[in-house]
Amino acid sequence: MAATDTEIGQARDLCRQWLDWHWKNYPADWPTEGNPMDPERFEAILDDLPSLHSRPSGGILVASLDDHPVGCVMYNEASSGVAEFNRMFVNENGRGYGIGRRLLEHMFEQIIQDGYKMVIFSSANFLTHAKAMYEGAGFSAIPHPDGFPNQWRPYVYFMERTLVD
């Protein structure tokens, strides 16, 4: 769990790497207007990371490889008993070591300790490797929530996983 200013800074740096990777790999035929990955909007979110994911209802996890930060995931309360995670990312130096899966497992342990019974998230359809990892970790597809913008429905999916019966 990231707790110090240094660790929060590492999470922010990883998120900026994610943003850069996202736009380099973003499908050219997808919409850009209203994209939550808009760099200006995203930077404002990064400024608020400690409050958005504050304990005890949230957390920021940072994974390291050879003492270098290579991955992160964050979560907070979506509703009573339900956590939502986002900004899950493993950079190119960390890929191929199972770090994404281990981040998920550590996050599951922590959110269960925090009293959550279920976890949800959304992601972009073009991230097919990530979707396969989530399915392998026991997530299943759920409908788009009420009020989700119609123009983004073809591009974004939602999933959930029960953690505690």
Image (spheres, rainbow, N blue to C red):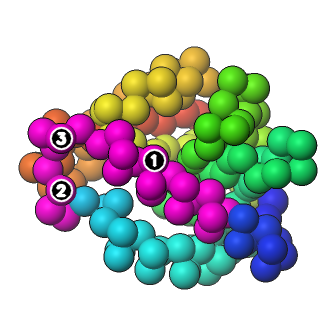
Which residue position holds label 3?
28
- What residue is rendered at 58% in x and 45% in y? 89
Give the amino acid at mark 2.
Thr
Inspect the magenta stretch and tell me whether residue 69 lies in it: no
Q: Crowding near pointer 3: few (<14 within 10 Å), some, many (20+)?
A: few
Disc 2 designates what residue?
32
- Quick one: label 2, few (<14), some, or many (20+) residues within 10 Å? few
Residue 96: % across, % down: 69, 24
Q: Quadrant of the N terminus?
A: bottom right
Which residue position holds label 1?
21
> Which of the two residues, 15 or 141, is positioned nearer the viewer here?
15
Q: Position of residue 35 (x, y in %)?
A: 25, 59
**What residue is shown at x 18% (from left), y 41% (from top)?**
28
Judged from the image, the secondary structure of the residue bearing numbered disc 1 is: helix
Of residue 60 and residue 93, the one placed in the foreground of this image is: 93
Q: CA distance from mark 1 to mark 2?
A: 15 Å
Label 2: element kind: loop
Does residue 27 show up magenta in the picture? yes
**Up-down relation of residue 164 to residue 115 (above or below):** above
Write down the region rendered in magenta. Answer: 11-34
Q: Report the Cα–Cα distance between label 3 and label 2.
A: 9 Å
User: Where residue 85 sits in the image (x, y, percent)?
Assistant: 55, 51
> Vertical placement of 35 versus 100: above or below?
below
Task: Tell me how far mark 1 sits from mark 3, CA to CA.
Answer: 14 Å
